[in-house]
């Protein structure tokens, strides 16, 4: 049975005003109780996407209820990273190249009650992917 949640969705690129909150239906986490428990400890999420001279850099942080929750969530994300590495090879090029680089560069850390996730992909790798859209 689906449950209702509120999510932020970016409807267009630009200023922060384009971020809109809306109700969405999500699958009931039956069978995924451990992940649902980890996610339920998140109180705030924020992030950035930026360009350096060479890379597209992404950062995401999630503030949890306590230090232990951040560590548990970090362990879960680390497991998902390892699982993702198995499936990257199934993607067509150039998606496979970008996904593999993003996973290889993925850094998952905690600082107090905050989970931090960082990765970067070379702009040169994104060109063929963008042209393919």
Image (spheres, rainbow, N blue to C red):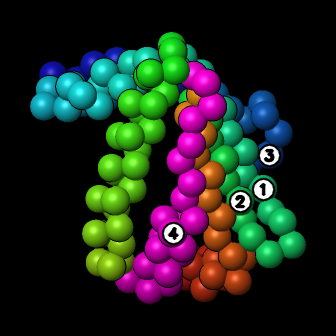
Dot 3 surroundings within 10 Å: few (below 14), some, or many (20 or more)?
few
Quadrant the N terminus occupies: top left
Q: Which residue is labeled 1 in the image?
A: 50
- Between 69 and 54, the one lying in front of the other is 69
Is 91 contained in the magenta span?
no
Residue for point 39% across, 56% down: 81
Asked if residue 3 lies left or right of residue 111, the reply is: left
Instruction: Report if the CB atoms under discs 2 and 4 are less than 8 Å apart.
Output: no
Seen from this angle, which residue lies furthest top? Answer: 65
Point out which mark residue 14 bears.
3
Mark 1 / mark 4, whichever is N-terminal:
1
Residue neighbourhood size for the residue with mark 2, other residues' Cα within 10 Å, grouped as few (<14), some (14–19), many (≥20): some
Rendered position, 108 above or below 112: below
Q: Which of marks 2 and 3 is nearer the N terminus?
A: 3
- The residue mark sitting in front, 4 or 3, is 4
The residue indicated by pointer 2 is 57
Label 1–label 2 contact, CB within 8 A? yes
Observer-side mark, 2 or 3, equals 2
At label 4, counting other C-alpha atoms closer than 10 Å, the crowd grade (few under 14, some 14-19, many 20 or more) is some
Residue 79 in the image: above or below residue 128: above
First along the sequence among labels 1 and 3:
3
Q: Which contiguous range is marked in magenta?
A: 92-113
Q: Which mark is residue 31?
A: none
Answer above or below: position of 65 versus 100: above
Residue 123 placement, left or right of 117:
right
| Coordinates of residue 8 in the picture (x, y in percent) | 57, 29
């Amino acid at each position: 049975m689906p449950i209702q949640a509120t999510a932020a969705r970016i409807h267009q690129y630009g200023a922060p005003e384009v971020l809109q909150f809306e109700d969405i239906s999500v699958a009931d986490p039956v069978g995924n109780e451990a992940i649902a428990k980890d996610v339920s400890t998140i109180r705030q999420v924020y992030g950035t996407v930026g360009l350096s001279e060479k890379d597209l850099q992404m950062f995401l942080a999630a503030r949890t209820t306590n230090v232990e929750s951040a560590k548990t969530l970090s362990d879960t994300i680390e497991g998902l990273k390892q699982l993702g590495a198995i499936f990257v090879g199934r993607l067509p090029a150039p998606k496979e190249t970008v996904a593999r680089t993003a996973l290889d560069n993925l850094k998952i850390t905690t600082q107090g009650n905050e989970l931090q996730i960082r990765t970067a992909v070379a702009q040169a790798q994104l060109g063929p992917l963008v042209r393919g859209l």
